[in-house]
Amino acid sequence: MTLRRLLRELLLAFLVGTAIFFVFRVIEYFNGARHELDQEFVIKFFIHQVYSVALYMANMVVIIFLLRRYGKELFKPRKLLLAGLGSVGITMSTLFILNTSFISYRLGVDLQHAISIQGAVDYWPSLLISVVITAIFYGVYYYKNKQERKVKEQKIIAGAASAQFDALKNQLDPHFLFNSLNVLTSLIEEAPHQAQKFTTSLSKVYRYVLEQKNKELVTVDEELKFARTYVSLLKMRFEDSIVFDIPERASDPETKVVPLSLQLLLENAVKHNSVTPSKPLRIKIEERGNDLVIHNNLQPKQVVKKGSGVGLRNIQQRYAILSDRTVDIQKTGKGFAVSIPMLTHQVSTAVKAKPQENYLEDKRYQRARERVEALKNFYGNLMAYCIVIPILWYINYRTSSFIWAIFPTLGWGFAVFMHWMEASGRNPFMGKNWEQRKIREYMDDEEF
């Protein structure tokens, strides 16, 4: 933890402790007690702040540890329950240490005697406050994580559709087709035999596009074979101005890549670099570990307009849909390399795109499940409210003439009411479709 973060948390702990201290003093005031701003008041405030800061920082350490260990998995119900129990445990331990230390200091007794004269009444008020604050913290972060997960799921769905559309749109650059037809025209006049070979290779390229466009993955061997066919077209066009080094086959025939990824990367290399007999472009494809690396020497064209990067984004998006492994891009002063993961059934954690005919049904099921889960959480909240609030009223009746139980009754009751509004899909303040509109707004924001 950085010093700045530590100071910020200490300040927040002090402010929370101050707020709780003055809430209790207001309750005591309405209950008939009168406080003077004297030395005793300052001592009470100091002791209260020691307890507040110590309990806050102890629980914060637990929370930071759990977040680092479990990440967003912490906000699943089972993990939340364990986190709550951990917070109760650290709260009780901290209270025990503080109570024992203060009793020993104020009464001038040893620690064993200080422990023996303590009872449950010394713990439950602080424990109750700490549990309520911890529950609020976890509740806020649980709701925030839930909303972020919804936005992420929607962006993944939209990204899948966008990536598939871009994959079809950018499989073969129209400029490539235009240039290929120009080359074919010149070859027909100058070298009819070469023109025939060029036409055969061009037809194989388009046949491969039509065969593979609906596939999620193809074997590396298939992609390498297609790359060699595509290279033959480029060689007829650029002749000795371009040099290729492509392996015959992959070391593991079971490995797979996204289709047409090599074609896009090869075309990018040609599109963005100068290709001349005096400065030939050298492109090499090789395996490095579990990646297929496409490397070329860097000799960028002197153009005013910068490339849009659509081809690379296309490949990155398709891999993001299919696997948690990412496409690595490295650019140096002398070369440019792109590493695409080679996937297998063993290492791939693909979340495969769903067929269109199953998508709506699955989406309805997902929304129905989320609604049932929200209703179940609401019923749990309502049950806890119905159990705890009567207990608080009973404690209020037996211990004080001031009706302080009205505050948790109204505050928690309002929270239960808002929970019901959310679980039932009602929102009188922002409208029924506010959440969907905000999700769409964030999805459309490229910087989100």
Image (tube, helix red, strand yellow):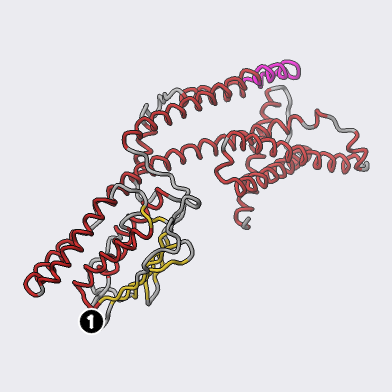
Q: Closer to the camera, 383 or 385?
A: 383
Write the residue at 37% across / 43% down: 353
- Decide if residue 302 is on the left or right side of residue 39: left
Instruction: Name the spot of residue 426 as percent of width and height, x first.
Output: 42, 24
Write the residue at 85% across / 40% down: 100
Q: Is residue 337 above or below residue 96?
A: below
Q: Which residues are magenta?
A: 388-407
Magenta stretch secondary structure, dominant: helix
Instruction: Name the spot of residue 447 as percent of width and height, x first.
Output: 37, 51
Question: Toward which corner of the image does residue 60 lie, by quadrant?
Answer: top right
Q: Is residue 291 above or below residue 60?
A: below
Instruction: Name the spot of residue 348 as percent of width and height, x first.
Output: 47, 51
Placement of the N terminus among the 4 image quadrants: bottom right
- Decide if residue 195 is on the left or right side of residue 297: left
Q: Closer to the camera, 17 or 358?
A: 358
Instruction: Name the spot of residue 258 as percent of width and height, x first.
Output: 36, 54
**On the image, numbered disc 1 is attached to which residue?**
277
Question: Toward which corner of the image does residue 408 lie, by quadrant?
Answer: top right
Write the residue at 12% across / 71% down: 193
Label 1, secondary structure: give it. Answer: loop
Q: Is residue 302 visible?
A: yes
Q: Closer to the camera, 175 or 135?
A: 175
Give the amino acid at mark 1.
Pro
Q: Is residue 396 magenta?
A: yes
Q: Is residue 295 above or below residue 255?
A: below
